[in-house]
Image (cartoon, helix red, strand yellow):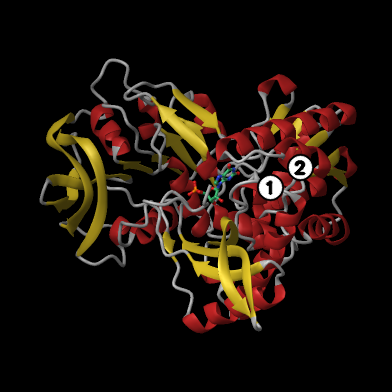
């Protein structure tokens, strides 16, 4: 394994993720682990991550100096480089300005770290401090206009980088990390996602013992992968719960039950709470009010089922991007807040959290899902909001309007799949508007509902671009919806990006 000492950077787990891409296993530990623990895991290399602190401040995070005498290769990244300079007798100071963004890096001395990397390449910088004087025996091996020590080296194998090789904006970043683990640490690149699954199963067994685990599933990739992994680990000690709030898409509840129970062998309880949800939503038009009612009702239903099950663990499909690090600048105490992506289940439930996917990124979860034999339909399903169709029916939600939207949405998605567009789009759905429009059908005037189609492309769902579906496909979708969905006589296409719009209409 390669040890990553985490100094609180938002990119620390991206380093781990890049090493997984190199098929190398890594272990992320907080920076202040004692030497004995570091030695006991016998790392083949140590990477010091970036971090928000300043090495020269009183309460700055520091590792023990002895790690440099273990004969193990060390790579410091950003704060990590400054930590090397600080610990080994160099100088670090505040730069004249904060350097953030692209810079051109020029290699000034060849080394194993820069094998197969061209002499100049573009790197991503994000730092306010700078090394102003190298420690004894160190030499610069790369520079940028703003920074004479963009990369440094001391024999036999201590390296530092001021830029971030782990972010995709750095050209050859992956190559540099690979050079470190392969040519400097001599790791064998034979660690696979299959190994991840085996380790994960073993760790779930160890964590849970003979206790029971409960977890809500939605049919999306995260909750499905978490459920299948847990079920592989502890069988019927785990029970998955599908709460049907009556706001799911056409046939979705059925498909999720069938997929999890029959295809994946997960013990699943189906709880039909749809009439309760619909009753509470009667007459409600305000989006935030809808969200509140749906969220609270979900918690109530789930709590009741969970306490009846006798479970002491709650499974959640939290991924790394859901884990928000809120670190106070310079402070060594990095608090990690967990974003509960299943309806915000309250702490008073007194259940311990089981989060087997919390180190992974979405595409890695998909890879794990494929290896577990989960059908692609669920692996590539577009995200679906907790409040479901209630926030896609503008205005009042009732059974009749739900049926209209379900039908229109199913035609839309079916046509996107048959045009091979579904996977190019990050999220697509139909929206039922609270207005009626005039039309002419046959020889008679109609006065009916309007459906809007939404499709966006995004990486993080914080910003999104509207997706240009070809006109011929739109034409087919529109004509099918108007012809097949009773009560709809007009289809419009949403061409707004986020910002200024949001992805959902409510
Ligand atoms: P917006 O509409 O905020 O959506 O641009 C961004 C992403 O979040 C989803 N979304 C929600 N998910 N509960 C959820 O679980 C919600 O209340 C909610 N509102 C929006 C939305 O589908 C998109 O993927």
* Residue 48, percent from left and from top: 38, 38
* Residue 216, percent from left and from top: 75, 41
Asked where in the image residue 383 lies, by quadrant, the reply is bottom right
Residue 227 appears left or right of 27: right
* Residue 122, percent from left and from top: 23, 59
229 versus 301 height, above or below: below
Instruction: Check disc 2 and report its element: helix, strand or loop.
Output: helix
Q: Residue at x 57, y 38 (%)?
A: 286
Residue under numbered circle 1: 397
**Residue 250 or residue 441, whichever sits in front:** 441
**Residue 78 or residue 340, whichever sits in front:** 340
**In contact (CB < 8 Å): disc 2 and disc 1:** yes
The answer to whether residue 311 is seen in the rendering is no
The answer to whether residue 464 is seen in the rendering is yes
**Residue 152 or residue 101, whichever sits in front:** 101
**Residue 273 or residue 16, whichever sits in front:** 273
| N-term-proximal mark, 2 vs 1 | 2
Q: Alpha carbon of mark 2 to alpha carbon of mark 1: how far?
A: 8 Å
Residue 280, which numbered label?
none
Q: Residues within 10 Å of mark 1 (few under 14, many from 20)?
A: many
Residue under numbered circle 2: 278
Q: Residues within 10 Å of mark 2 (few under 14, many from 20)?
A: some
* Residue 493, percent from left and from top: 49, 68
Q: Residue at x 65, y 38 (%)?
A: 284
Residue 142 appears left or right of 380: left
92 versus 499 height, above or below: above
Specify the farthest residue to the front: 444
Q: Residue at x 27, y 15 (%)?
A: 58
Instruction: Check disc 1 and report its element: helix, strand or loop.
Output: loop
Q: Residue at x 10, y 51 (%)?
A: 145
């Amino acid at each position: 394994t390669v040890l990553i000492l985490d100094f609180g950077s938002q990119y620390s787990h991206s380093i781990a993720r890049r090493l997984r891409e190199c098929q190398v296993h890594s272990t992320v530990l907080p920076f202040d682990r004692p030497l004995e623990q570091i030695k006991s895991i016998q790392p083949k290399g140590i990477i010091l991550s970036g971090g928000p602190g300043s090495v020269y401040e009183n309460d700055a995070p520091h590792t023990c100096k002895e790690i440099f005498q273990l004969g193990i290769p060390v790579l410091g990244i950003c704060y990590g480089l400054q930590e090397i300079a600080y610990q080994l007798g160099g100088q670090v100071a505040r730069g004249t300005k904060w350097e953030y963004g692209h810079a051109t890096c020029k290699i000034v001395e060849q080394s194993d770290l820069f094998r197969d990397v061209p002499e100049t390449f573009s790197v991503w910088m994000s730092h306010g401090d700078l090394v102003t004087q190298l420690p004894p025996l160190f030499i610069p091996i790369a520079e940028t206009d703003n920074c004479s020590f963009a990369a440094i080296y001391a024999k036999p194998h201590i390296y530092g980088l001021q830029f971030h090789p782990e972010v995709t904006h750095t050209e050859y970043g992956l190559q540099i990390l690979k050079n470190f683990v392969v040519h400097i640490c001599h790791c064998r690149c034979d660690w696979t996602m299959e190994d991840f699954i085996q380790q994960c199963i073993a760790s779930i067994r160890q964590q849970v013992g003979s206790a029971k685990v409960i977890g809500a599933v939605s049919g999306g990739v995260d909750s499905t992968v978490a459920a299948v992994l847990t079920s592989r680990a502890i069988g019927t000690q785990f029970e998955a719960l599908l709460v049907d709030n009556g706001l799911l898409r056409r046939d979705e509840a059925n498909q999720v039950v069938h997929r999890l129970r029959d295809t994946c062998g997960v013990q699943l309880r189906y709880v039909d709470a749809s009439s309760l949800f619909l009753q509470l939503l009667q007459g409600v038009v305000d989006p935030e009010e809808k969200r509140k009612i749906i969220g609270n009702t979900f918690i109530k239903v789930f709590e009741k089922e969970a306490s009846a099950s006798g479970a002491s663990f709650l499974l959640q499909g939290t991924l790394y991007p859901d884990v928000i690090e809120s670190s106070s600048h310079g402070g060594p105490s990095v608090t990690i807040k967990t974003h509960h992506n299943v309806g915000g289940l309250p702490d008073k439930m007194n259940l311990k959290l089981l989060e087997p996917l919390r180190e992974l990124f979405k595409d890695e979860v998909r890879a794990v899902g494929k290896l577990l034999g989960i059908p692609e339909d669920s692996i590539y399903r577009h995200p679906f909001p907790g409040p479901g169709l209630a926030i896609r029916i503008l205005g009042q939600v009732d059974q009749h309007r739900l049926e209209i939207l379900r039908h229109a949405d199913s035609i839309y998605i079916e046509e996107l799949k048959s045009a091979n567009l579904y996977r190019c789009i990050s999220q697509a759905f139909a929206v039922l508007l609270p207005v009626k429009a005039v039309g002419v059908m046959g020889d008679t005037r109609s006065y009916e509902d309007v459906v809007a189609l939404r499709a966006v492309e995004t990486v993080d769902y914080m910003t999104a671009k509207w997706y240009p579906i070809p006109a011929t496909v739109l034409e087919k979708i529109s004509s099918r919806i108007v012809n097949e969905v009773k009560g709809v006589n007009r289809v419009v296409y949403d061409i707004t990006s986020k910002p200024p719009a949001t992805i959902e209409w409510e």
